[in-house]
Amino acid sequence: MPADYDKGAYPEPPRQTPAVDKQTALPNPALILSKLFYYSVDLPVTTFRDAVDSIRAKNKIVYYHQKFRRVPDLTECKEGDYPCYYEAEMQWRRDYKVDQEIVKVIQERLRACQQREGHSYQQNCAKEIQQFNEVTKNFQSRYGDLGAYASARKCLMKQKERMMAAQAQNV
Amino acid sequence: MVGTSVLRSVAAFAARLSPLKSGNTAANLLTRAIPRTDKVAVRWGHGKRLFVIKPSDYYDKRFLRLLQFYILLTGVPVAIVVTGVNIFIGEAELAEIPEGYEPEHWEYYKHPITRWITRNIYDSPVKDYEKMMAAIQIEKEKADMRLTQLEVRRHMRQQGDGPWFQVPTLNKELIDNSPKSLPDH
């Protein structure tokens, strides 16, 4: 079976099933339905999965997560050195993708927290909410309105504008 | 003819009357089943049998039949291959890169068919990157050369001592100055 999700980031709520206290002699319909579901759906699916896994176990293949070397940034390239510009641009694009995925993970955590806590999410998920706000604010300030044709140069110019605005504000 | 029934004898008499009709030859006379028209079960359903006059649906049916055939012609082998790959080979699992090992470029993908395509059909991403960088370098050198050419042209035009803006003229030593050497010629 594939690996389970990160239990630390998505903690399970405490179980609230009460202890069994049967007071009638009649059969429990929930038990009957759950057994029916188990024998008609769960068992066939699990046996099929186990059969296919045993066939697949002979031809196991693995894949790896690619690690890219860091190359000089756009600010460290000499003027007119177009291959350097290209490498910096590719590195910026990879970093942009990574940042988008980071924002998605934080969003997913907040969503899971809200689903878990129900109506009391505003106080119980305060940490997740604060994390989400911080991450999205930073993402917006860095990559915010760059648009579909975003590039490393445009992002650098946006950073320059931010720095100029901060300097104007400080003075 | 002792073993035959009345029917068969009647049929034999009728065959003798019209011997050329099909079904009346001696070979299938004794063995064919003669239907009795008054005792056959007539099943037209619970209603009246109608002869519905409607436009021909032959062309539509033919189109749909051919569509189904040509879609399934490649669809079924593709479906069999993809199902076989998913059952017998299965997707890859994520693993840590071992120490000192440089994975090939196809080992970064999950599905076996994607791995096969990137291994056999596509170039590796490293090669694509290098191709792009080479193209950029060539274009950069071309642009630099064009700029230097313009610069050199400007200089040569101004100074006039370079080889580009010189018009070849006749050799001075070929001029015959003898008609002008004496004042009275």
Image (spheres, grey):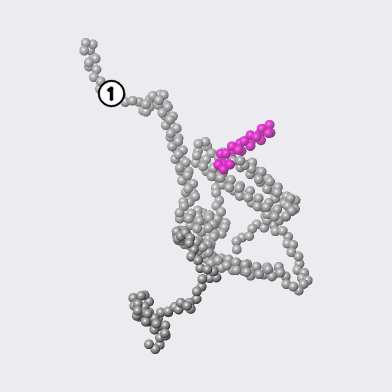
Confirm whether residue A105 shows in the render. Answer: yes
Q: Residues within 10 Å of mark 1 (few under 14, many from 20)?
A: few
The residue at 66%/32% (across/down) is A168
Instruction: Read off the magenta span.
Output: A147-171
Q: Is residue A161 magenta?
A: yes
Q: Is residue B182 left or right of residue A113?
A: left
Whether B67 is drawn above or below A90: the answer is: below
Picture coordinates of residue A38 (x, y %)? 65, 68
- Quadrant hosting residue A167: top right
Picture coordinates of residue B56 (x, y %)? 46, 60
Q: How many marks?
A: 1
Decide which of B50, A8 is in the foreground and name it: B50
Confirm whether residue B74 shows in the render. Answer: no
Of the 4 image quadrants, the one containing the N terminus of chain A is bottom right
Decide which of B150, A25 is in the foreground and name it: A25
The residue at 55%/52% (across/down) is A66
Decide which of B118, B159 is in the foreground and name it: B118
Picture coordinates of residue A128 (x, y %)? 70, 50
Q: Is residue A112 left or right of residue B98?
A: right
Decide which of A143, B74 is in the foreground and name it: B74
The residue at 58%/47% (across/down) is A97
The residue at 74%/73% (across/down) is A26
Q: Is residue B170 magenta?
A: no
Secondary structure type for disc 1: loop
Of the 4 image quadrants, the one containing the C terminus of chain A is top right
Whether B153 is drawn above or below A86: the answer is: above
**Outermost bottom residue:** B2
Q: Which residue is mark 1?
A: B171
**Outermost right residue:** A23
Report the amino acid beneath label 1. Asn
